[in-house]
Image (tube, grey):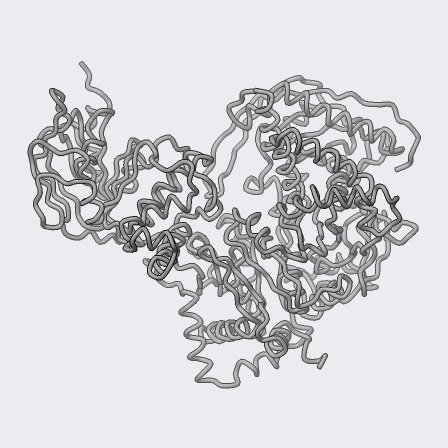
Amino acid sequence: MEEQRDTFPRLLAHHAAVRPGHPATREKDLGIWQTWTWSQVADEVRALACGLAAEGFRRGMHLAIIGDNRPRLYWSMVAAQALGGIPVPMYQDAPAADFVFVLNDAEIAYAVVEDQEQVDKMLEAMPQVPTLKHVCYDDPRGMRNYEGVTSFAHLQEKGREFDRANPGWYEAEVAKGRPTDVSVMLYTSGTTGKPKGVCLTHDAFIAAARGGCSFDRLTANDSILSYLPMAWVGDHLFSIAQWLEAGFTINCPESGDTVMTDLREIGPTYYFAPPRVFENLLTQVMIRMEDAGAIKRWLFRRFMDVARRCGAEILDGKPVGGGDRLLYALGNLLVYGPLRNVLGMSRIRVAYTAGAAIGPDLFRFYRSIGINLKQLYGQTETCAYVCLQPDGDVKLDSVGLPAPGVEIRIGEGGEVLVRGRMLLKEYYKRPDATAESIDADGYFHTGDAGFLDDAGHLKIIDRAKDVGKLGTGAMFAPNYIENKLKFFPHIKEAVAFGHGRDMVCAFVNIDAGSVGNWAERRGLAYSGYTDLAQKSEVYQLIRECVEKVNAELATEGDLAASQVHRFLILHKELDPDDDELTRTRKVRRGFVAEKYAVLIDALYGGKAVQHIETLVRFEDGRTNMVAADLKIDDAKTFPAAHGKAA
Amino acid sequence: MTATTRRAGDVILKLDNISLSFGGVKALTDISFDVREHEVRAIIGPNGAGKSSMLNVINGVYHPQAGTITFRGEVRRDMNPHRAAASGIARTFQNIALFRGMSVLDNIMTGRNLKMKAHFLEQAIWFGRARREELEHRAKVEEIIDFLEIQHIRKTPVGRLPYGLQKRVELARALAAEPSMLLLDEPMAGMNVEEKQDMCRFVLDVNEQYGTTIVLIEHDMGVVMDISDRVVVLDYGKKIGDGTPDEVRSNKTVIDAYLGVAH
């Protein structure tokens, strides 16, 4: 019955028929995990779709979806698709003003949102978004005195009435859907310019989901925690596309703050997290180990040495000596097993990370304690599906082999080009951008610079447009340097400058948790982030990190010229609310360079101190000025050693 | 945007000519004011004005030497804390009074104490009525945990929590008694701006969602003027102002008491 499974609403009907009693969605509510089976989910989606239809939602319309990961919001996506509509999930932590552009661009008339907070944002945006008329909310708390907005329960009730009055209507709508219809529109975070709506079809997402599921042998018995922003392509791939393809169970955490507890309770078998989550977890483990008793600390150190030596090899099934195997088995009993349990990763079969480079030490740590952590590579435009690392063939510095059904070519200037069913249909209302990114041969230009190694694994160097040249003519790959810096737990964010200059300089953001703990253990008093960042002891700490990076760069041939000569520690964290980062937390390089031009001048002008005043914007839209005198420090550089080519 | 149509109802608590002294110290002198159902009523005043004493008179910790208290039509010389709690008055304290070694969940459960009917022996063997009851109480407590957004610290011992969260847990325990009137003694003292904003929102939410009458003492004038319907101003144990925030703000005596008088 393959032809019956070519759109998401049909996939839902398939699971409701094949495994009606199997858990499809769970949510922790009032302290208890609530479960909905596939047949219940199908029923909820049907009521919702009919409710939307009763309110006037029609084929081809866009449905805005805003909120944390809630079952009802996921169901709304499928409900919109069942009617031939297109869900447009948006980042829930953005202020109202940021929504206006997307709401207008997508001509949103209907929005399904989580709670009062999001309803308030919609009402605030309404005067500037003439099309927006219908707002439906999930959580009724605090909504008693609102008028002109609909509750979820009411919408479904209306839907059930409509369904009774129009029997067979829902089935007919689902039957009208074609695989070539756009199934979702995801806005790119936009490191440059305004966000663009990426239109992805049912066929593209189902191809990506099917490929991924067969690659990692995902089945209905798997279970995942859905906690990443719904507007992000990765979450859409895992929590909608693969969910509906494989028929496994998605679990929605109680709140953003309880994710770690919920992870432990659920024990997912398939897990995704961006590198910073893995990094935070490791930092927490390390902080707790520092506070542990002497025996535990000794055990941990002793067995982590064993794991480092042979853990990853054992996971990959490579030959390892009998003595090490025995030690590792003992370590598994005493350290790794309990540690996996604390992390909520006891049952994990496949874990992925992507979105940013992951530090080799970090990556190795998880693999060495027996967690099958792998990397994947993809963009919003490719349904987050281009390369996957196969089990047993994981290389630290590559993103893996081309996924089933994906063709990769290296274009001009080392740019990675990809082709396959998973590509976007178009950028919404932007034929110019569409034409620019998809060439005549049907290849999508990723904008990433990379190369395929001898074994066919793809290695990514940097964003193609970010790769520049130093004044001396040597290659300058800022991301590469920044990633090296960020691999230190004390450094949260870094921005390197050097294009067209004669040396590389950098801004550094310290990690408040890690450096704060470090300061506490040394009895170093500080009053807040800005104060901590400017302590000379902290500068000393960061300088050591920078110099280690310089020592590494010195051995990497061409990149030896990219050693960081001078750096400063920023007085505030780079923040998406101040437009310095995108919502997916990538640095907006151009914007930062412009905003902090005075600091860059100071770096290159040889100054030792620079005064700066910065406007800070809070999540509720209020602003405040922060002023500080920033120190600028020199770091030791090393002569280029031609041991190893980059 | 939030349409706050508060339905201030009839007078439910009336204090007439209350005087309270400790030996020679006159804490309260001849104070009268009333509280209407569903309103947010603030008591403000400089340090030592008698605000906490006033609250203690309302819930019966102190017994005034003169005056009467009328609560829901019943006239009394004084209250006592147990009777106050039984008739639906709950409170929080200026210095947090929680069980520091117990989890957040257990602390809030203690707020349900008066509602538990089962005998302690039944509770000890966790059988029949006791079991049913505990499940009901736990459900109610979970509702409050959800309401105050403290799910992530459910199992954390209170002693390990930062101050702002402890205050929230204390409010949760008071709410667990499902009070019709809530007395809050400086709910926002010692908090940073963000924590204060959160607390304000919760106080207003409680008032709106459950219709709970709220009497609060607060130092932060901004907070008081923002969230209360009517304000009583005390100074040296005497009432020097009473009315809406706007009226109080323009009251000459109040301004003098807060800013000092030019000599």
Pick the front one: A455 or A634: A455
* Residue at 36%, 48% in the rendered image: B109
Residue A326 horizontal side relative to residue A621, left or right: right
Residue that lies at the very extreme toward the top in this rendered image: B263
Q: Looking at the picture, does residue A494 appear above or below residue B257?
A: below
Residue B146 horizontal side relative to residue A634, left or right: left
Residue A465 showing in the rendered view: no
| Quarter of the view holding residue A26 | bottom right
Q: Looking at the picture, does residue A350 appear above or below residue A527?
A: below
Pick the front one: A336 or B44: A336
Residue B212 showing in the rendered view: yes
Residue B198 horizontal side relative to residue A494, left or right: left
Q: Position of residue A189 (x, y in %)?
A: 63, 50
In which quadrant will I find the N terminus of chain A? Answer: bottom right
In which quadrant will I find the C terminus of chain A? Answer: top right
* Residue at 79%, 44% in the rendered image: A311
Pick the front one: A631 or A352: A352
* Residue at 67%, 22% in the rendered image: A602
How many numbered marks have been drawn onto this rendered protein structure?
Answer: 0
| Quarter of the view holding residue A225 | bottom right
Q: Position of residue A331 (x, y in %)?
A: 74, 42
Q: Position of residue A396 (x, y in %)?
A: 81, 45
Q: Position of residue A630 (x, y in %)?
A: 61, 22
